[in-house]
């Protein structure tokens, strides 16, 4: 059984991602394609601050 704190953290990540305009499926796809959790968190924070995906390039050089 998963710990409540881990489940809560995942729930909060999913909610923040959706507020930033990502579906859960998109976030999973980004992680599966090699984006780190840290980079996903930065991307979500950036979007919540008003960033535009069309102009963003990740540190790995991928255009997202």
Image (cartoon, helix red, strand yellow):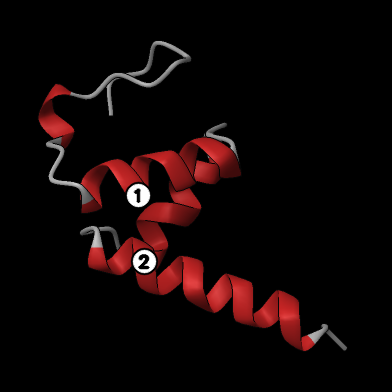
Which mark is drawn over residue 16?
A: 2
Task: Name which residue lies at 58% across and 44% down.
Answer: 37
- In the rendered image, the vertical position of residue 34 relative to residue 20, given as above or below: above
Residue 15 found in image quarter: bottom left
Q: Residues within 10 Å of mark 1 (few under 14, many from 20)?
A: many
Where residue 30 sits, quadrant-wise, is: top left
Tell whether 42 sits left or right of 33. Answer: left
Q: Is 52 situated left or right of 7 in this image?
A: left
Vertical arrangement, residue 20 with respect to residue 39, above or below: below
For the view shown, which residue lies furthest in the right direction? Answer: 1
Question: Do the CB atoms of the residues marked 2 and 1 lie less than 8 Å apart?
Answer: yes
Q: Quadrant of the C terminus?
A: top left
Residue wearing tag 1: 44
Residue at 88%, 89% in the rendered image: 1
Q: Position of residue 12 (x, y in %)?
A: 49, 74
Residue 14, percent from left and from top: 44, 70
């Amino acid at each position: 059984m998963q710990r409540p704190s881990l489940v809560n953290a995942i729930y909060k990540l999913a909610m923040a991602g959706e507020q930033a305009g990502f579906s859960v499926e998109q976030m999973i796809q980004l992680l599966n394609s090699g984006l780190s959790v840290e980079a996903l968190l930065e991307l979500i924070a950036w979007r919540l601050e008003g960033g535009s995906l069309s102009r963003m390039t990740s540190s790995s050089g991928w255009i997202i």
